[in-house]
Image (cartoon, helix red, strand yellow):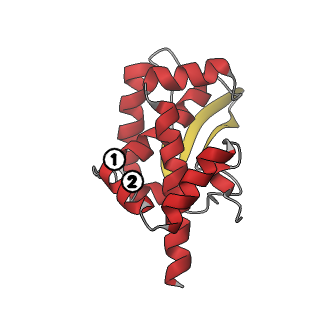
Amino acid sequence: MDPLPYLAGYPVDVQMRARELRNAGRLGDYLARRYPDAHGVRNDRQLYAYVQALKDRHLRQSTPLHKAIYDGKLQVLRHALGTHTTVSRVQGGRLKASREIRIASVFRDAPAAFLETSVVHELAHLKESEHNRAFYNLCTHMAPDYHQLEFDLRLYLMHRDASSASQT
């Protein structure tokens, strides 16, 4: 039985069903039916506007966000689908901090719901640094079906890897 790295923490029966869908070639159809909508967020300026709009809607009281960009260097499996960082620098006699979010460039072509999932995840880190109950409560506040979207995003990544492996 081949390992499913994106679904490692899920129950065996869920992994078996995902493996069956992938092996039967139906995973792509399943995802296309559930998530037919593409998004128009193609460049960093549009991504910043998109992230800022979500932040303004759900996290008005959080710290300001200075940058949101697509990052082609993020390794999907090894590192993350996105990162949030605080960059501190000395400016005159003061210490200035700026917050930035980097989203893996794989989301440029992903369905709109998956971009939203990644952005919501990184925005939640503005308030909660750890993946704890408060963090996931914040995620579901911003995207009520967050847990299903996160699971389907993992299926999407699994399908994407299987498709690229079959093309080589």
At mark 2, the secondary structure is helix
Q: Position of residue 19 (x, y in %)?
A: 58, 59
Image quadrant of residue 144?
top left
Q: Are marks 1 and 2 in contact (CB under 8 Å)?
A: yes
Q: 51 above or below 168?
A: above
Q: Position of residue 81 (x, y in %)?
A: 58, 50
Name the kind of residue labelled 2 in the image.
Answer: Leu
Name which residue lies at 59% across and 34% down: 98
Name which residue lies at 62% across and 23% down: 135
- Which of the two residues, 125 or 92, is positioned nearer the viewer here? 125
- Which of the two residues, 168 or 34, is positioned nearer the viewer here? 34
> According to the image, label 1 marks what residue?
34
Q: 109 above or below 117?
A: below
Q: 47 above or below 64?
A: below
Name which residue lies at 71% across and 57% down: 78
Name which residue lies at 36% across and 39% down: 50
> According to the image, label 2 marks what residue?
31
Q: Position of residue 3 (x, y in %)?
A: 71, 61
